[in-house]
Image: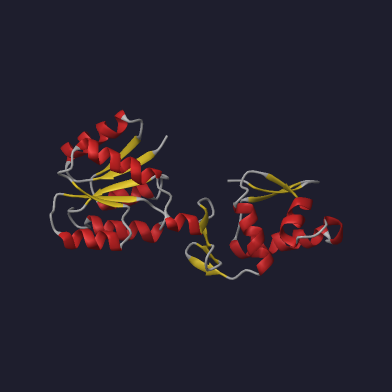
Amino acid sequence: MIKILFVDDDSRYQIVIKNLLESEGYEVFLANDAAEGLGLFNRIPFQLIISDLKMVSIDGLQFLSLIKKIDERAKVIILTGSDNDDDEVKGLTLNASDYIKKSASLSVLLQRIKKVLSEESTVQQEMVYSNKENIKVNLRERHVYRDNQLIELTLKEYELLLFFLKNKNIVLPREQIIKEIWQTNPKYVDSRNVDNHIKNLRTKLKLSSIYSIRGVGYEWFE
């Protein structure tokens, strides 16, 4: 079920939107302010965050900025009762998925929510992730981050990491790994070479997700 976080300090409006979204089959979590919203966001994998613009202490744009620092893939819709175009420009500059006036009808709001949920973000296309390990790989720049820290990997380690991340929860025989990463017949590569590269990858990234499958190969379990 798609999980949506809705952050707004107007409890009556919260209930209206919650009922609307739940009637469409979404699971909705409510937060009364940005701090509560961040707490939920850090514990629950949401497919969409909807936030009011004007809130006490931390406003919707600041909240959007904080969310994007945690996960730049996050889809965030900003709702506002303001007619200030500058706010909308700032929101779009911060990569808000959409910026919607609260005066929009509920049917229009619902359709725009569905549109955002159906879109695959450009960032997502350029990135590969492990939520369990807090790892993200920038495919365009070939950069690997663990806990938002850049980690230097060799080419083979980088290719191994990508192969595992793209084949999570699948047992990968050593022969298949050699064919994919070393691009050669498995009989020409010592299987201990594979083991050593994976050992180095585990060490550099402090991995707990790669499991040895005795007599077969490895699995990234997440």
Q: Is residue 216 left or right of residue 38?
A: right
Q: Residue at x 44, y 58 (%)?
A: 123
Of 189 and 218, the residue lying toward us: 189
In this picture, is 169 found above or below 164?
above
Q: Is residue 189 left or right of residue 13?
A: right
Residue at the limit of the structure toward the top, as seen here: 23
Q: Quadrant of the N terminus?
A: top left
Q: Which residue is drawn at 50% across and 67% down?
A: 149
Q: In this view, does 178 lie to the left or right of 105?
A: right
In this picture, is 125 found above or below 19?
below
Q: Position of residue 130 (x, y in %)?
A: 53, 53
- Image mark count: 0
| Quarter where residue 139 is shown | bottom right
Q: Is residue 111 left or right of residue 141?
A: left
Q: Where is residue 218 in the image (x, y as percent from the top left)?
A: 71, 49
Q: Where is residue 29 in the image (x, y as percent from the top left)?
A: 32, 39
Q: Residue at x 31, y 62 (%)?
A: 94
Q: Position of residue 43 (x, y in %)?
A: 41, 47
Type of colouring: secondary structure
In this picture, is 175 found above or below 183?
above
Q: Residue at x 63, y 64 (%)?
A: 158
In this picture, is 153 found above or below 118?
below
